[in-house]
Image: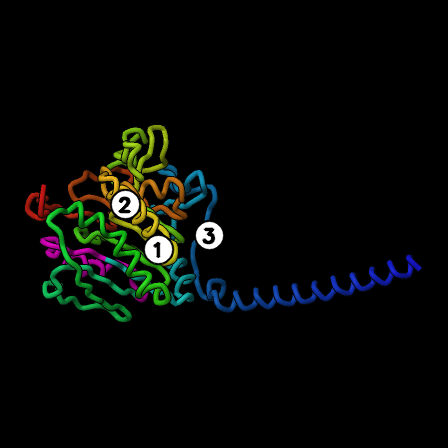
């Protein structure tokens, strides 16, 4: 009787496995047919065979936690576009132009319209205390601009300290269901070369151009243990620039909210981190590793000598007199 029962169970199990197998393999083969039909890569796109032996050897192209580091010579623009074009993405881009910094908007926007996310839907969100001073710039197809009026401050430090809070609220109130990715970029910058979807990832950081060859104990981290941005000596991976923050909108929201909360704690304790939100950003990335890192090509400085490892300047901070554009020293 037990043998008969066991045989019956065995037959039922075998039938179940066969059914699951048929469903799985049928679904899988259908998925591959679907994916192949959507990719367009195998049928219509021609590109040079990739090599795992030859490539950039003068710079790091992947971190110890296996996040890619994007440099010229590490990606194929046409191939990446063929992949992302299928996804029909929208990229929000926030810019803060307060006080005399509004003078940098025209060059920022005009250069972005030549080089930034060309061929994709882009929505600029301009935070400013002077909406009337936002320049009229001809935007490409599927690109738009929204001006958001906010109050300024008589301290530039206070302006930077509140960026995380405003970014957090914008995502919650307007962007969470409207865009796929977001970048927050400094306004006193200009695009000089291609900046495309090779920069997209879950959470994206940029290497600060002033410290990419510096030992970590010389990074300008916040070193006071009283601050929520505190990073002790002997810790840290890279020094990330606060002029570029990006990623999937939900991931950037988590980053902005976490940094805002830590900034609030510091403020309650009368502490201001060494480099305001940039210090908190570096603390966040120490414990929440970025999934993609942009090389200093994506954040250079016009005053800085171009080193041999920098093959192209894509985005750079422009020359300015801080004493004339900042409201306080």
Q: Nearer the viewer, mark 3 or mark 1?
A: 1
The residue that label 3 is drawn on is 49
Q: Residue at x 41, y 58 (%)?
A: 79
Name which of mark 3 and mark 2 comes first in the sequence: 3
- The reply to whether callout 3 and callout 2 are in contact (CB within 8 Å) is no
- The reply to whether callout 1 and callout 2 are in contact (CB within 8 Å) is no
Q: Residue at x 23, y 62 (%)?
A: 125
Query: Crowding at label 3, few (<14), some or many (≥20) Cα neighbours within 10 Å?
Result: few
The residue that label 2 is drawn on is 263
Horizontal side of 183 relative to 203 (left or right) equals left
SS at mark 1 in the image: helix
Is 97 covered by the magenta stretch?
yes
SS at mark 3 in the image: loop
Task: Measure the alpha-carbon separation of dots 1 and 2.
Answer: 15 Å
In the rendered image, the vertical position of residue 208 relative to residue 30, given as above or below: above
Q: Position of residue 225 (x, y in %)?
A: 31, 32
Residue 104 shows up from this direction:
no
Q: Nearer the viewer, mark 3 or mark 2?
A: 2
Q: Quadrant of residue 273?
A: top left
The magenta-colored residue range is 95-121
Task: Measure the alpha-carbon separation of dots 3 and 2.
Answer: 48 Å
């Amino acid at each position: 009787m037990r043998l008969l029962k066991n045989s019956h169970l065995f037959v039922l199990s075998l039938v179940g496995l066969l059914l699951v197998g048929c469903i799985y393999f049928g679904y899988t083969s259908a998925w591959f047919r679907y994916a192949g039909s959507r990719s367009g890569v195998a049928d219509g796109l021609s590109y040079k065979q990739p090599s795992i032996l030859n490539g950039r050897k003068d710079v790091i192209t992947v971190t110890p936690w296996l996040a890619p580091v994007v440099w010229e010579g590490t990606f194929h623009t046409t191939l990446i576009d063929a992949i992302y074009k299928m996804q029909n993405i929208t990229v929000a881009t926030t810019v803060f132009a307060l006080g005399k910094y509004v003078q940098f908007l025209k060059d920022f926007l005009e250069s972005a319209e030549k080089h930034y996310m060309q061929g994709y839907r882009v929505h600029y969100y301009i935070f400013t205390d002077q909406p009337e001073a936002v320049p009229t710039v001809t935007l490409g197809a599927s690109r738009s601009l929204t001006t958001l009026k906010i109050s300024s401050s008589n301290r530039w430090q206070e302006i930077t300290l509140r960026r995380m809070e405003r970014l957090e609220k914008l995502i919650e109130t307007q962007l969470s269901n409207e865009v796929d990715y977001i970048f927050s970029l400094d306004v006193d910058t200009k695009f000089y070369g291609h900046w495309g979807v090779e920069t997209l990832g879950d959470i994206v950081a940029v290497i600060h151009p002033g410290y990419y060859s510096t030992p970590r104990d010389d990074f300008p981290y916040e070193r006071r243990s009283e601050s929520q941005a505190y990073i002790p000596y002997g810790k840290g991976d890279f020094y990330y620039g606060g002029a570029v923050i990006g990623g999937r909108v939900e991931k950037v929201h988590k980053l902005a909210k976490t940094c805002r909360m830590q900034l609030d704690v510091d403020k309650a304790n009368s502490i201001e981190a060494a480099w305001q939100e940039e210090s908190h950003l570096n603390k966040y990335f120490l414990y929440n590793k970025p999934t993609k890192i942009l090389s200093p090509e994506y954040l250079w400085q016009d005053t800085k000598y171009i080193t041999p490892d920098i093959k192209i300047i894509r985005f750079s901070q422009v020359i300015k007199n801080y004493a004339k554009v900042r409201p306080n020293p």
